[in-house]
Image (cartoon, helix red, strand yellow):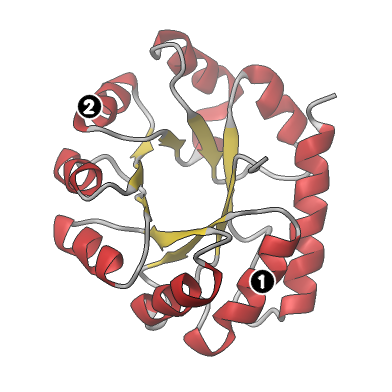
Amino acid sequence: MSLPLIGILRGVTPEEVVEIAKAVLAAGITHIEVPLNSPNPLESIRLLAETLGEHAVIGAGTVLTPAQVRDVQAAGGGLIVSPNCRPAVIAETHRLGMASWPGIVTPSEAFDALEAGATGLKLFPAVQVGLEGMKAVRAVLPTGTLLYAVGGVGIDNFAEWRAAGVDGAGLGSALYKPGQGAAQVGKQAQALVDAWLAGEQ
């Protein structure tokens, strides 16, 4: 079973991305994004799609325009994650048959995203919205809407966020920081997975 976690490799380079992503995948995180403000991100996505595409969903983060969506698809990506809610980006992602995770804070953004065809919603930054704010948004969303918390969510508070109603999480600097090697990232990935699973109890 795939865990509802997205690994964010912001700042990763093409030279190191495959080994780092393999370490993330080995821990059980099967959705991996390379933010487009990383060095040569489309090359990293292409390499990941070629080497790990059968075992993981590969894509891009910080996607801001429909043209970028098309670029990611051309590189072999199938996942589009954004920090904001732009219906044109979501619609293009949906049209191309890719998974769309736009960033939302307010109910208005959430419903605009769902209307445009979003796969799920990325509550970002979750630390700013807080647990009470998230519960207020969650309460008005249609049944079955997937809501992932990103930004300030990790080992220390997974259980609280899960109990409050989030379905998954995006893992950024707690998973990977530029300069870290595959072995270290693998340990961090495993610790995050263990903490997420512990929150089920």
Q: Which mark is residue 112?
A: 2
Q: Secondary structure at mark 2?
A: helix
In this view, the residue in front, 60 or 48, is 48
Amino acid type, callout 1: Lys
- Image vertical order of residue 102 relative to residue 160, above or below: below
Q: Would you call the spot at circle 2 few (<14 residues within 10 Å), some (14-19), or many (20 or more)?
A: some
Q: Position of residue 114 (x, y in %)?
A: 28, 26
Q: Residue at x 67, y 62 (%)?
A: 25
Q: Residue at x 48, y 41 (%)?
A: 125
In this view, the residue in front, 136 or 92, is 92
- Residue 156 in view in this figure: no
Q: Left or right: 18 with respect to 141?
A: right
Q: Left or right: 103 with respect to 164?
A: left
Amino acid type, callout 2: Asp
Q: Position of residue 39 (x, y in %)?
A: 41, 82
Count of numbered labels shown in the rendering: 2
Instruction: Please give the residue where the numbered disc 1 appears in the rendered image.
Output: 22
Q: Secondary structure at mark 1?
A: helix
In the rendered image, the quadrant that contains the N terminus is: top right
In this view, the residue in front, 53 or 35, is 53
Q: Left or right: 170 with respect to 49?
A: right
- Residue 161 in view in this figure: yes
- Image vertical order of residue 122 relative to residue 93, above or below: above
Q: Which mark is residue 104?
A: none
Q: CB under 8 Å between callouts 2 and 1?
A: no
Q: Residue at x 49, y 29 (%)?
A: 147
Nearer the camera: disc 2 or disc 1:
1
- Image vertical order of residue 57 relative to residue 176, above or below: above
In the rendered image, the quadrant that contains the C terminus is: top right
Q: Position of residue 22 (x, y in %)?
A: 66, 71
Q: Residue at x 16, y 55 (%)?
A: 66
